[in-house]
Image (cartoon, helix red, strand yellow):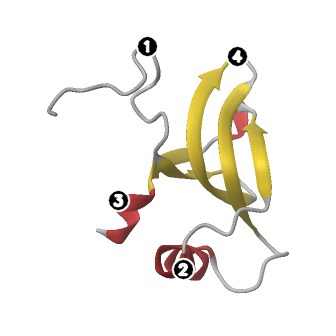
Amino acid sequence: MSGHVFHPGHHDLHGITVVLETATALWVGRFDSVTPKGVLLHDAGCYEDGVTAGTREEYLQKTLKFGVRATTKNKLIPEGEVRGMRQLAEVAG
C-alpha cells in the first residue's frame, strides 16, 4: 500500500532499524521516537570506540550479515549527542 502509515502520528522512521552515530559510539537499533530527552531505540546493539574490537565499518558489515546483536532492550540517546542517523538499509546500498 503506497502511502500507508502503520502507526499514524509517529515519526517516519518509527519501527525502522537505524544507525545512530555519537562522538564515541555507534548504535544500531529499531527507531521509536524523538522526545525532549533524546532519541529512543529498541533492541539496540552498540559499537564503542576503544572498547569494541574492530572498526565501526566492520561492526556495520557484521550487523548487515548476521543482524543486530541486541545488547540493550531500550536505549535513550540524548539528542545533543547525536551526530548523525540513517537507515541501516542505506548502509547496505
Q: Secondary structure at mark 2?
A: helix
For label 1, the crowd category at 10 Å Cα-Cα, with few meaning under 14, some 14 to 19 and many 20 or more, is few
Residue 66, labelled with which disc?
A: 2
Q: Is residue 10 above or below residue 15?
A: above
Quarter of the image where one finds residue 24: bottom right
N-terminal label among 4 and 1 = 1
What residue do we see at 74% from left, 39% from top? 77
**C-beta proximity under 8 Å, tags 3 and 2:** no
Q: Is residue 83 above or below residue 10?
A: below
* Separation of residues labelled 4 and 1 (CA atoms): 17 Å
Q: Secondary structure at mark 4?
A: loop
* Separation of residues labelled 2 and 1 (CA atoms): 32 Å
**C-beta proximity under 8 Å, tags 4 and 2:** no
Query: What residue is shown with label 3?
Result: 90
Query: What residue is shown with label 4?
Result: 36
N-terminal label among 4 and 3 = 4
Please indicate whether residue 53 sits to the left or right of residue 7 in the image: right
